[in-house]
Image: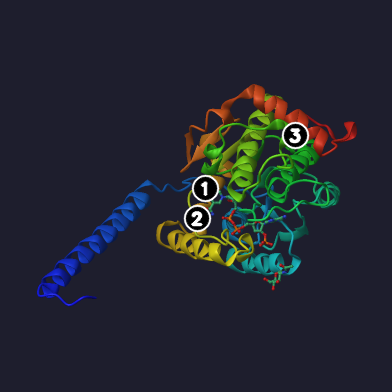
Amino acid sequence: MVLHPDVPLHSALFTKITAAMLLTVVVVVVVALVVHRCMMRRCTSTRSLAGMTAIVTGASAGIGKETAKDLAKRGARVILACRNQTKAQLVADYIISVTGNKNVVVCLLDTSDLSSVRSFAEEVLKTEGAIHILVNNAGIGGKEIQEITCDGFDLTMATNYYGHFLLTNLLLKRLKESAPSRVVNVSSLAHFFVWRLNLKDLNFKKRSYSLLKAYSQSKLCNILFSLELAEKLRGSGVVVNSLHPGTINSEFVRDEMVMSWWRKPFLLFARIMLRLLGKDSELGAQTTIHLAVSEEVEGVTGKYFDECKEATSSWLAQNSGLAKALWEITEADVQLAPSEIFY
Ligand SMILES: NC(=O)c1ccc[n+]([C@@H]2O[C@H](COP(=O)([O-])OP(=O)(O)OC[C@H]3O[C@@H](n4cnc5c(N)ncnc54)[C@H](OP(=O)(O)O)[C@@H]3O)[C@@H](O)[C@H]2O)c1
Ligand SMILES: *[C@@H]1O[C@H](CO)[C@@H](O)[C@H](O)[C@H]1NC(C)=O
């Protein structure tokens, strides 16, 4: 710095401005935290699930783990549908130890792989006489560089959407037999980021790919799927709803999402923001639990929820013609056989 007679004055001013800015940031963060806290709602239902069976996909971490724990606490038989046996078994042991419910089991499922979905469904249909609750929760934020799965799908679309589409269809027969039953789809506010759904290129093969585009599109498809399935199942006693869980400090932001060093700081920033502003996973599971168990939403179907209340999804997500078209394309993409159709 160049020496100057009024440097002390300048630096005093500078310190004041810096302090004012810091104070503003602190105030904004605190206000945001307080507002966020006040808006958080919990599932208030005390309903018992004794004698009922629930499946939770992606129950080895975050929202899925807390959802599974709550359902187990209510006495349900809970199947943790997870891709990592070791990690899932540790969670099962933990849930058994804190709830005292020994009826918690792991069954392997990789939602990004259609053959894994088919063998999971086969196994579960063999062992489970009834399925009352299916929580389609497993999901990834995606990766900076696109990956294509063995079935030829975009990895994010496969994990968050295609796998659950097939899974739900394969379990539909049992869900119907077990009615009243419920399908809960964990979507995201991110679905609002999609302006136009390109049905001809759902897997980003002909257009440019980005992590955010793939993630938000997969979450839009979740809602549209729910909408169309709800329509198809009207009167069957099976209800289907989707939700945004909130901003949750789970394991969602993962190292593998980003490869380039210059983007790594964004991951760190995202983690810090989630830490500061996000809800913990136990709170993050409340809307999912509400839709899975609460008497308040009995018979409600084809709706979108946020903070345990019905909310408005995007304009695209409410387009029933689009939902129908997407359903038909997806059905062909996952090669749903006539013997696998139960709607
Ligand atoms: N966190 C948020 O702020 C937020 C906001 C909106 C929506 N969501 C949605 O909430 C859902 C749960 O996310 P979370 O925040 O709880 O994240 P998380 O802590 O990362 O948990 C994700 C779960 O999904 C599992 N999973 C990922 N890929 C899978 C696959 N191919 N097959 C089977 N399971 C798989 C993970 O298994 P492993 O343990 O083996 O990795 C884990 O159990 C996701 O659908 C996400 O899109 C989250
Ligand atoms: C599975 O989970 C275990 C325990 O958390 C972890 O050590 C292991 O790396 C995981 N495996 C894979 C393939 O992610």
Q: Which residue is mark 2?
A: 248
**Nearer the observer, disc 3 or disc 1?**
1
Does mark 1 have its CB less than 8 Å from ligand 1?
Answer: yes
**Nearer the observer, disc 2 or disc 3?**
2
Residue in view at x 69 percent, y 54 percent: 77
Residue 4 appearing in the image:
yes
Q: Amino acid at mark 3?
A: Lys
Figure quadrant, ligand 2 = bottom right
Q: Amino acid at mark 2?
A: Ile
Dot 2 or dot 3: first in sequence order is: 3
Pick the front one: 132 or 283: 283
Dot 1 falls on a residue whose secondary structure is: loop
Bin the neighbour count of mark 1 within 10 Å (Cα to Cα): few under 14, some 14-19, many 20 and up: many
Q: Which residue is mark 1?
A: 245
Query: Which quadrant is the N terminus positioned in?
Result: bottom left
Does mark 2 have its CB less than 8 Å from ligand 1?
Answer: yes
CB-based contact (under 8 Å), mark 2 and mark 1:
yes
Q: Amino acid at mark 1?
A: Pro
Q: Residue 6: horizontal and vertical position, in percent? A: 10, 72
Colouring style: rainbow
Pick the front one: 13 or 179: 13
- Residue 213 vs 16, above or below: the answer is above
Q: Residue 272: horizontal and vertical position, in percent? A: 44, 64
Residue in view at x 75 percent, y 66 percent: 85
Residue 236 appearing in the image:
no
Q: Which residue is mark 3?
A: 176
- Residue 3 vs 153, above or below: the answer is below
- Name which quarter of the figure residue 219 lies in: top right
Q: CA distance from mark 2 to mark 3?
A: 32 Å
Q: Residue furthest bottom?
A: 3
Q: Residue 106: horizontal and vertical position, in percent? A: 74, 60
Specify whether 119 is left or right of 309.
Answer: right
